[in-house]
Amino acid sequence: MKRSRVITTALVFALGAGVVAFAPLPGASVKPANRRFRVEASSFKYAPATIKANVGDHVTIDLVSTDVVHGLYVDGYDVSVTADPGRTASLSFVANRAGMFRLRCSVTCGAMHPFMLGKLHVGRNDLLWRALALALLAGLVGVSLAPMRGVRT
Ligand SMILES: [Cu+2]
């Protein structure tokens, strides 16, 4: 009786783990959206430093410089924009490639200019959610088997 319960639990866990790890997510066919970001550039940082979009999104970045002339170049997409002090300049592109892309200042703006960096994250963080779901599932199995240990002793 106990043995069959362990086997059943193991089977349910294996099935659940398979579903969690390989099933397509319901939101996988999310329609591309227009995403607009306002990024403030000041010596020598971007705020926000990280922006996120999904694959297929139409991304517009409004670069606002609050002190000197700054630029923003998106690695991997090869697009850039330059903003004069107090002005806003815009940059648009379709985020058709998934991954993490570096944003860097394209105008030599001072001593720390090479360190003026940001990030563009394109894509869904599926792996993180699947890992969390697997951990939750493992926890549930642990809880469901825990009372049996008490019975045995
Ligand atoms: Cu710079």
Image (cartoon, grey):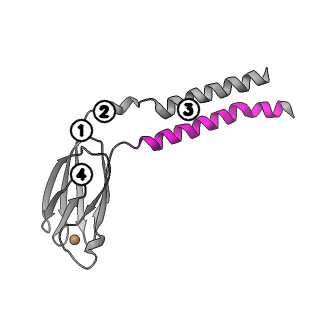
Q: Mark 2 — residue? A: 30
What residue sits 24% from the left and 38% below the top? 33
To which quarter of the image does residue 107 belong? bottom left
> Are the residues at dot 2 and dot 1 in contact (C-beta closer than 8 Å)?
yes
Amino acid at the residue labelled 3? Ala
Q: Secondary structure at mark 1?
A: loop
**Lower position in the chain sequence, tag 3 or tag 1:** 3
The amino acid type of the residue labelled 1 equals Ala
According to the picture, the residue beneath numbered tag 3 turns out to be 17
Viewer-side residue, 8 vs 50: 8
| Residue at disc 2, secondary structure | loop
> In the visual, does 80 lie left or right of 11?
left
Residue 135: name its quadrant.
top right
In terms of depth relative to the viewer, which is nearer, 114 or 14? Answer: 14
Tell me whether the residue at label 4 lies in contact with that at label 1, contact meaning CB atoms closer than 8 angstroms: no
Query: Residue 9 in the image: x percent, y percent?
Result: 67, 26
Residue underneath mark 4: 37
| Number of the front mark, 4 or 1 | 1
Which label lies toward us, 4 or 3?
A: 3
Q: Please state which of the two labelled residues, at mark 3 or mark 1, is closer to the viewer.
A: 3
